[in-house]
Amino acid sequence: MTGKLEGFQAISTNTTTNDYCIKQYTKQDKNNICTYCYSNEMLRTYRKNMAPALQRNTDLIASKVLHPDVLPVINNAFFRFNAHGELINEFNLINYVNIAIKNPHCTFSLWSKRYDIVYKYFKDHDKPKNLILIYSNPKINHILENVPKYFDKTFNNVQEDLQKPRQNCTGQKCKDCLLCYKFDTTNIIVEKVKTYGKKKLNQKMKGE
């Protein structure tokens, strides 16, 4: 990974072919963070060459429950699921769970808005102790204080000039912070809306 996620490795999927992502992105709802999706913007422009590899991940990880022998061994202390993408279906979630089970030495963090998929699976299955589930709050400028069931934390976005004292995920690299990658930190993460969509967001908020 690069930028904020420099030093991290991740398994990601293709945002531009995910039905959920397409629906949320095309709503053009100024209050929904998906409208300003950095992944969609990147994969359609200067990171377009990444899309085929992410599509291969999508096709594999969402097609069936993979045999443990074909799941990767992760030689990291911390790892991210879906630096690009969103949960596609239950197969996708099960395969991530099984990767975590196969690598108990590593802590995995998964961001998701798909409460429907998470709830359906974990109401009947135990969550691995090394998997941190972070509910990615779609609503901008509305900090979600109550963590949904089966999740460990919430991730919230606000305009850069709002809630400044609470912005604990702004202006730093993940490897120097690790709020999202450890259980014993705050469970409410707040970040200013990413620069990529900031101008468009501010214009819409002001009604321009």
Image (cartoon, grey):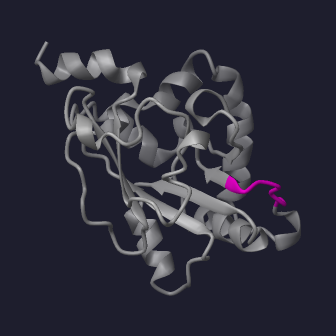
Task: Give the left or right position of residue 63, taking residue 120 as reference.
Answer: right
Can you say which quadrant of the picture contains the N terminus?
top right
Can you say which quadrant of the picture contains the C terminus?
top left
Quarter of the figure with residue 120:
bottom left
Answer whether residue 127 is visible to the viewer in this image.
yes
Residue 193 placed where, x, y %?
34, 31
Q: Nearer the viewer, residue 76 or 137?
A: 76
127 is within the stretch colored magenta: no
What's the residue at 41%, 40% (across, down)? 169
Magenta residues (range): 72-78
The residue at the far bottom in this view is 124
Answer whether residue 88 is visible to the viewer in this image.
no
Q: Nearer the viewer, residue 38 or 182?
A: 182
Eyeballing the image, is 41 above or below 65? above
Q: Nearer the viewer, residue 47 or 111?
A: 111
Residue 124 placed where, x, y %?
50, 87
What's the residue at 69%, 68% (across, down)? 100
The residue at the far left in this view is 207
Q: Main secondary structure of the magenta part?
A: loop
Eyeballing the image, is 88 above or below 104? above
Q: Nearer the viewer, residue 173 or 116?
A: 173
Quarter of the figure with residue 66:
bottom right
Task: Give the left or right position of residue 153, taking residue 39 as reference.
Answer: left
Quarter of the figure with residue 104:
bottom right
Task: Give the left or right position of residue 187, taking residue 72 as reference.
Answer: left
